[in-house]
Amino acid sequence: MTPPLEYYLLFAAALFAIGVAGVLLRRNVIIVFMSIELMLNAVNVTFIAFSRQMNNIDGQIFVFFVMTLAAAEVAVGLAIIVAMFRNKESINIEDMNLLKW
């Protein structure tokens, strides 16, 4: 017995809402970064749920590409965060104004 599609969509909506709340409410760069990854995973759950519902593999292929994009984002994002931490010695978002003149 498999759960209905609505359960997967509610779970994905809850994950996405938690991610949005983390991006909007937190000031720590690492937590904001993790919240963005949580939103990407919520989209992946939605892709998989619809792929399974439609008996089509296209959603799983999209998940593969999204996970590849997320891995590249992690590599570049963490490198930027480490460079900014070495420069400012803080991971607070308000302290990250290096691009302002």
Image: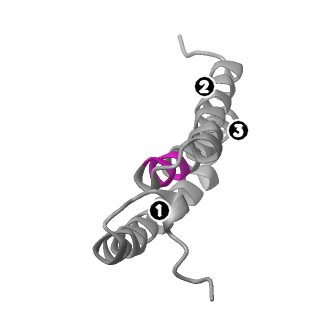
Tag 1 residue: 70
Distance from the alpha carbon under mark 1 to that under mark 2: 20 Å
Q: Is residue 83 left or right of residue 97?
A: left
Verify CB contact (< 8 Å) between mark 3 and mark 2. no
Q: Position of residue 19 (x, y in %)?
A: 58, 40
Q: Is residue 14 magenta?
A: no
Q: Amino acid at mark 3?
A: Met
Q: Front-most of 9 and 100?
A: 100
Distance from the alpha carbon under mark 3 to that under mark 2: 19 Å
Tag 2 residue: 11
Residue 100 appears in the rendering? yes
Question: What is the span of residues highlighted in magenta in the rendered image?
Answer: 31-36
Q: Is residue 53 above or below residue 26?
A: above
Q: Front-most of 48 and 23?
A: 23
Please tell me whether mark 3 sits on a helix, a strand or a loop: helix
Marked residue nearer the N-terminal end (1 or 2): 2
| Residue that protrudes farthest toward the bottom in the picture | 101
Q: Amino acid at mark 2?
A: Phe
Disc 1 packing (10 Å; few <14; some 14–19; many ≥20): some
Q: Is residue 43 left or right of residue 72?
A: right
Q: Position of residue 97 (x, y in %)?
A: 55, 74
Distance from the alpha carbon under mark 1 to that under mark 3: 25 Å
Tag 3 residue: 54
Tell me the residue at 55%/16% (across/down). 2
Q: Amino acid at mark 1?
A: Ala
Residue 66 appears in the rendering? no
Q: Quadrant of residue 22?
A: top right
